[in-house]
Amino acid sequence: MAEFESWSREQLIEHIAALEVKKNKGKQVAHTNDVSPDKQERMFKFNSYAQRKIALKFCYHGWDYNGLAFQVTPTPLPTVEGVLFDALCRARLIDRDAGFEGCDWSRCGRTDRGVSSAGQVIALKVRCSLRPKVSKEASLNEEEDVQKEEEKEGQEQGQKEKEKEQEQGKREGQGQEPPIEILYTQVLNRILPPTIRIIAWAPVREDFSARFHCRYRHYKYFFESLSPPARPLDIPRMQEAAARLVGEHDFRHFCKLDGSKQIERYERRVTSATISEVVPSRSGSEKPLYVFDLIGSAFLWHQVRHIVAILFLVGQGFEEVDIIDALLNANASHPNPDPSVPFLERRPLYDMVEGLPLVLWKCGFDEKDVKWRTDDYDGEEAVVPSLMPSTIQLRESMESALAASRIKTSLLEHFFQTAAEHHPTPAVGTDKVVRVHAGGGRIRHFNKYEPLLKRKRGPTVTEVNETWKNGRGPMVAARRAAKISAAGRMEEEEGPE
């Protein structure tokens, strides 16, 4: 310590700084030596591997996620795309640094928080097991080297090739195609949580878009009728109302208006709208389960949930079937020719139903664009289903989730039966409370019901768009565009449900 007594304050600080630098360098060297060679190999050179564009079909439990689309701002729950993107990166199928834009990511249909899907589709470029990318010069040199090697080996090499061809012919004769591609389904399902399952994949052309090449989207909404004292649902009335949705109509009163999208055209074509019984009642005490099937080329934001809300009002007798015609009569340039149908420039205020029972059931594509396959075979011929490990593992994980759900349902039914022993079923209208079906087991309570045509009206499409443009819209849009650019995310499109 005596040697430092004559040092100035500046000299002491400089000496301490030098010791800190030396100490940190020692830590870095020790850390590097402790890491295994596999972990040191962090730089995965995606440019050294071939890529192909594929489509992925997958299902997910919507109640566990904050919607499908990746969000640039924090969300209470993870998003499906966020979890799927991380799994693809962990499998080294895409480059995390390149982001969504780097892999040419596109989705078929966006679903909001709580909404599930049985057949969602995305398209993107991924790493494949084809030969690595090499320059033309390197390729020529490689061919020359191979040629020299073959000439040197002579007849011995020729014999090996002959034996290889015979073995290949034997495999093909037995119907066993050699694995020539990454097992995308198996690889991703091992990484993903059980609430997201990859069902199939398909090779697609470079310009394929999961959104724009989709020919139709099929949604399902599952529901039961309400028990007393609430009004039950009149299914035939609902079926009659649903039939009036078929065709091309202006659905501005069946969706949520969003000024940030600046949408001016609200015409959409519905090809099918039906209500059917899914699980018939096996006894007088059980309620049947119904499903509303809606098929169309494209949908507006929350369109399906607004439609179901109106169908419930019709089914409970709060509104007449003709309310569908009135809500569709919203375009002044194409009014309903029937003068008895009122024209509604503004939408009556009403709430949409819950998102839990809503499922994006299927995304339809032309067969020439998408030919779905599993991990069994990556050829051009038809895929013959087989019991590969990926198939067994997929079925096992989904059956486990289904079994757990059935057990919970059975427990809740027994709980209800126990309570019913002490609390009898009331009659319809026992009290004066108005109960409106909200879907997903939810009920909205009112003192009295106000018909839709007598309610307050919301703003027009023009007013919503102008309010956005003249208000905080440009500032919010610029801020969001900056966040999207920084996150490497494609611009959000119009939401379909």
Image (spheres, rainbow, N blue to C red):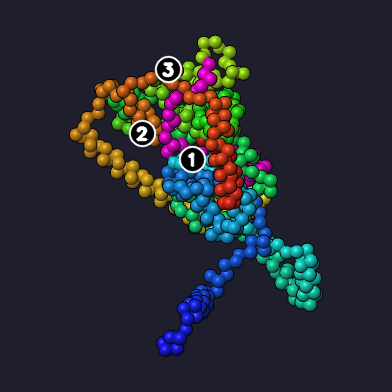
Give how far across and how far down residue 191 sits, in percent: 49, 57
**Helix, strand or loop under label 2:** strand
**Helix, strand or loop under label 3:** helix
Q: At 68% across and 47% down in the image, what residue appears?
A: 205
Q: Residue furthest bottom?
A: 2
Quarter location, residue 362: top right
Label 2 to label 3, Cα distance in Å?
Answer: 25 Å
Q: Residue furthest top?
A: 339
Q: Please name whichever residue, 121 or 251, is drawn nearer the observer in this view of the structure.
A: 251
Q: At 58% across and 33% down in the image, what residue appears?
A: 469
Q: Is residue 24 left or right of residue 155?
A: left
Residue 348: in magenta span? yes
Counting residues from the start of the chain, the first of labels 2 and 3 encountered is: 2
Does the image show residue 276? no
Q: At 45% across and 17% down in the image, what residue appears?
A: 453
Residue 429: in magenta span? no
Residue bearing mark 1: 112
The crowd level at tag 3 (other Cα within 10 Å; few <14, some 14-19, many 20+) is few
Q: Give the residues drawn in magenta, as a range.
A: 343-372
Query: Hey, what amino acid is under mark 1?
Result: Asp
Residue bearing mark 2: 442
Does the image show residue 330? yes
Q: Which mark is residue 454?
A: 3
The crowd level at tag 2 (other Cα within 10 Å; few <14, some 14-19, many 20+) is few
Q: Nearer the viewer, mark 1 or mark 3?
A: 3
Q: Please name whichever residue, 388 or 415, is drawn nearer the observer in this view of the structure.
A: 415
Label 2 to label 1, Cα distance in Å?
Answer: 18 Å
